[in-house]
Amino acid sequence: MKLSTRNRLSAAGILSLPVLWTTVFLFIPYAIIFTYSFYQKQFPTFVPAFQFGNYALIFTDPQYVQVLLRTAKIALIVAACALFLAYPFTYFLVFKIKSPRVRLMLYMAVIVPLWVSYLLRAYTWKTILGSEGVLNSFLVMIGVLDQPSDIFLYNQFSMVVTLTYIFVPFMVMPIYTSMEKIPRNLIEASKDLGVGPFRTFLKVTLPLTTPGIVAGATFTYCLTFGDFIASFLVGGPDGLMVANVITSQFGAALNWPLGSALAIIMLIVVLTIISLSDRVERSGRLDLA
Amino acid sequence: MKTTTTRCPARLKGGLLAASVAMTLSAGTVFADGEVNLLTWEGYADDSFIKQFEEDSGCKVSATYVGSNDDFAPKLAAGGGVYDLITPSIDTTKIMIQAGFVEPVDVSKVPRWEEIYEKFRTSEGINHDGEVYGVPFSWGSIPFMYRVDKFDTPPTSLNQLWDSELDGRISLWDDKSALYVASRVIGNMDIYNLTDEQLEAAKAKLIEQKPLVRKYWATAGELVDLYAAGEVWISNTWGGYQSALLAEQDIEVQEFIPEEGAEGWMDSWMIVKDTPNLDCAYQFINMAISEQGQCGMSNVNGYSSTNVVAAKNCMSEEQFTALHQDDVDYLDSLLLWTNLGPRLEAYTNTWNAVKAAN
């Protein structure tokens, strides 16, 4: 009795800090934003109210739907590109590289850029993709282009390239973890049973790495969905993302209620994706059992 | 006016050196009899004239910088008696007054008030219910600018910003002012009183232009980078500012006022409501419209002065002419930014819709 009370006390002690943290820095701000999202714009600022006008506007004015769809599209492309880069790379790393030291080095080579400022890395792409940039100079030098092209920068292509580059470590890490955990004897067993390498991959490796893929896709998708720097730095006139619109509502438009409603919708999208991926991951686990 | 970049033009270095020497000498003497906290554009709190003020007045100056006029309201709305003085442009001043962020200025405490251009002193944006709310400090235009080496015949009209020959070489300021530009091209010259139909027309015109636009520029530094990297050949600009930065990089650009006219802007010092540092605030305002503040501001930013008497005293003949200080017709030709009132939302939404369009 005494012991369990003490346990409970110490558990409460340990938990109180994170609970306090999440309450003060997550739940209260969410609640404030949620409340604001029902307020009403009234020049010059806004007034408290309870009405659904902000949400109605988002779904009736095509500009918001357009931006949400574009953001979703770019996030999907980035997640797909990151997957197609990260999966073969990680596969090569885990199954083909024999030396653990080389493997670690290559793994770190992907992860290390995370320690470099995001802004700096995004900015670097401007100097690579620009009209007078590294890529153009190279293509002109080897004769592929007659003159520098401006198709590489300030459009959705450059946004996808930059975001993929920046977020690819978040795809590599979970896939690497899931691949490393695959017992080698499972693959050998498959071979022993006369199954070819391709079917072994489909039947053994791929299913066992699905949780990693799902986690990586969730990370890259959600991070891209909330990004506004890429649009600002390397995006063109058609590069507006939903986070940029939110920024503008809190700034130029001084319409915090509409900005809050957009933020809530964004939160719902992200939470939906996370709970879906959680479900996929769980169902994957069940399949194995 | 508006900038997020730091810079130190060559012509300033001497002044900065002198100021830092002066500061070293004064170290240890009185400071902080009072204080004044500014929320302003970067070039408006430059050490070249602020240090001297701190010594003379004993008021310690702290400055927080804004990147756009849209930053004032959110910062003040967040509350908290942090700032004493702000410098919004003339299209934003009225919002500050109506939102209750600022208090009236007692012009009897501003001895040189009468020396300021009458057009500015009496402007609707800083006068409200018979009270004055702002002290005009600086003004300029939003001209257009082009790379001299890329044009055989100098551009003269805004129509060139819709010229497919310039595909991918055009930039516009990421601001509602893009609507002012498009409206003038269409022929709707009353750009601050556009109806919904006229806004729709401006929107359609801007969407038509979108494929030709390389990038909408958001900060002063970004536009300079776009020119320097050869991405952009023609755009609007903050008169006198980015062109000077580009000149330092040996990139030859020319500003011009298009046939369709250009917008003008004016910034004023406004006193934040219930400031505890009222005395230092007035001392600062009086310095700002004196020779020290007026030439200090003009030298750092390349903008024109509002106190023409002070400007005459402290500027060279060339600078005085170059900044149109003696040219009332020039000032009158500018479409001076105006508070849009409740229409602001319609303008902002239209501009957002342009950017959102596919």
Image (cartoon, rainbow, N blue to C red):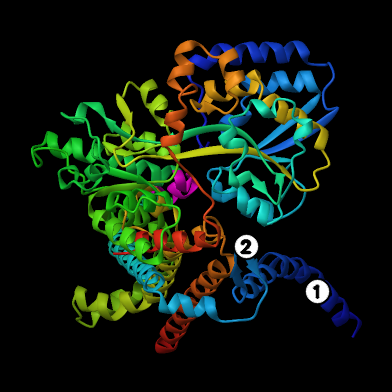
Marks 1, 2: nearer the viewer: 2
Estimate the x, y position of residue A256 in percent, counting from the top left: 58, 65
Q: Residue at x 60, y 81 (%)?
A: A51
Subunit that carries the residue with mark 1: A
Residue corresponding to mark 1 = A12
Which is more toward the observer, B56 or B10?
Answer: B56
Figure quadrant of the C terminus of chain A: bottom left
Estimate the x, y position of residue A79 in percent, counting from the top left: 35, 66
Subunit that carries the residue with mark 2: A
Query: Overall secondary structure of the magenta stretch?
Result: helix
Separation of residues labelled 1 and 2 (CA atoms) = 43 Å
Estimate the x, y position of residue B331 in percent, counting from the top left: 46, 32
Vertical comparison of A204 with A99: above or below: below
Q: Which residues are magenta?
A: A108-119
Local secondary structure at mark 2: strand
Vertical comparison of B255 with B86: above or below: above
Q: Which one is earlier in the sequence, the residue at label 1 or at label 2?
A: 1
Left or right placement of residue A7 versus residue A257 in this view: right
Q: Residues within 10 Å of mark 2 (few under 14, many from 20)?
A: some
Residue corresponding to mark 2 = A45
Vertical comparison of B10 with A163: above or below: above
